[in-house]
Image (tube, coloured by chain):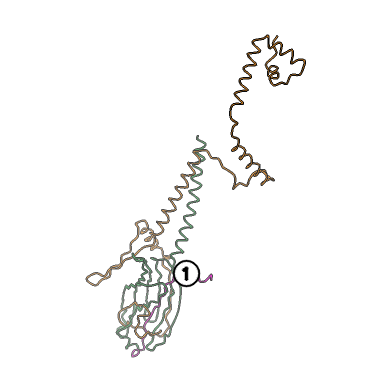
Amino acid sequence: MVRRGLLLLMLIVGVASLAAEDLDLNDLEGLLDEALQLNITAKVLPPNDQPVYDVRSSKLTIPGRSIAVKMVGENVRVDVVLTPYLADNNELVLVAQGQVWLSEVPEEAVKYHATIKSLPIELGEKVLFFPLGLDGRLSELAETQSFTIQLEIEVLAYKELLKAAVQ
Amino acid sequence: MCPDKETLSAYLDGEIELPWRERLGKHIKECPACQEYLDSLRQLSGRLRADPEPDAGPSLERLKHRLAARAAYPASGRPPIWRRRITLPLPLAAGVGLVILCLAVGLFAAALNLKSSVPRMSIKKLPYGATEVEVAAPIEDLEKLLKSLDQPAFTEEIIFTLPEDSRFIMAGEPRMLRAEDIPGSRSW
């Protein structure tokens, strides 16, 4: 009877350890299902229509995990934290938190601006974020030979990209 | 002297040759004990003949299956392991069943937990103009989330160095919008 009990206990411990390994694998597969690829293109906008600077980067993430973009220029430092979230209705929402340190002539004092913006998005849709603003003083860009910044963000399902790559 | 029981049984079955059969017949006529024993043997034989023959069909079928299986696996004389019957003691079978049940429940719970491990968010516009962002996650996941946030590697980071000799200005309020919503669609 005792021998049978020990055998049963060993069996349970063995199966439980196997189950733990399976759960880890399941977690990883679940993460792969949730994974998103963010394609981020930073552009510097001059007064005319053609950007003078156009750099692209891609990062993998999951909903709720942030991607930080830092841009450093002569008179500016811009930190943007981009976080894709799943809303309660399973809608994908992109949240952009921006912090800007900017010195402008003639004051030369460093001004700090902070903002948070959110937008419900579709997978594959292109979203534009202007941490330094878009309207209002655009006409001044030409007068002062100054520039502003545009981030173009595209959120894609990583699993779909993998499928497309295999095909 | 009386013959033994086997001899009397052989006499009844007609297996005793002459002249011994005549001598035995004379003895039996004069011996009540031998007559009584022979009567009992006759009665037993009559009862056995009166009973119906047992149905050997199922046994015969099992025998045929065994012979067929032996013919199918002549090398080892046994079927392959996946076709063999396994006999387990009842407590062991019950234990295995319990383990499988626990495993199924554990996997189901893990799947549920995984579904809820992604933090969800709701955004509310408050009456005085502020925006409230609420991230909802189970408490154990929130703890994990906070621990992860403390780690510098939690956030993926991209660094862009902007072109030199470029001065930037704030061109209005920061904005986020869909590319298709830009009026005139300035294709920067």
Chain B as rendered: colour: orange
- What chain is tagged by disc 1? A
Identify which residue is drawn at 63% across, 19% down.
B42
Which residue is the extreme one toward the right?
B19
Q: Amino acid at mark 1?
A: Glu
Residue B40 position within the rendered picture, expressed as x and y whole percent measured from the top left? 62, 17
Which residue is the extreme one toward the bottom?
A143
Numbered disc 1: secondary structure: helix
Residue B59 position within the rendered picture, expressed as x and y whole percent measured from the top left? 60, 37
User: In the picture shown, does residue A11 fall above or below A47?
Assistant: above
Q: Quadrant of the C terminus of chain B?
A: bottom left
Q: Check residue A151 for magenta coloring.
A: yes
Q: Quadrant of the N terminus of chain B?
A: top right
Q: Check residue B96 for magenta coloring.
A: no
Residue designated by label 1: A160
- Left or right: residue B34 versus residue A95 is right
Identify which residue is drawn at 31% across, 65% down.
B134
Residue extent of the magenta highlight: A142-167
Identify which residue is drawn at 61% across, 26% down.
B49
Q: Quadrant of residue B119?
A: bottom left
Q: Which chain is green?
A: A
- Left or right: residue B102 versus residue A97 is right
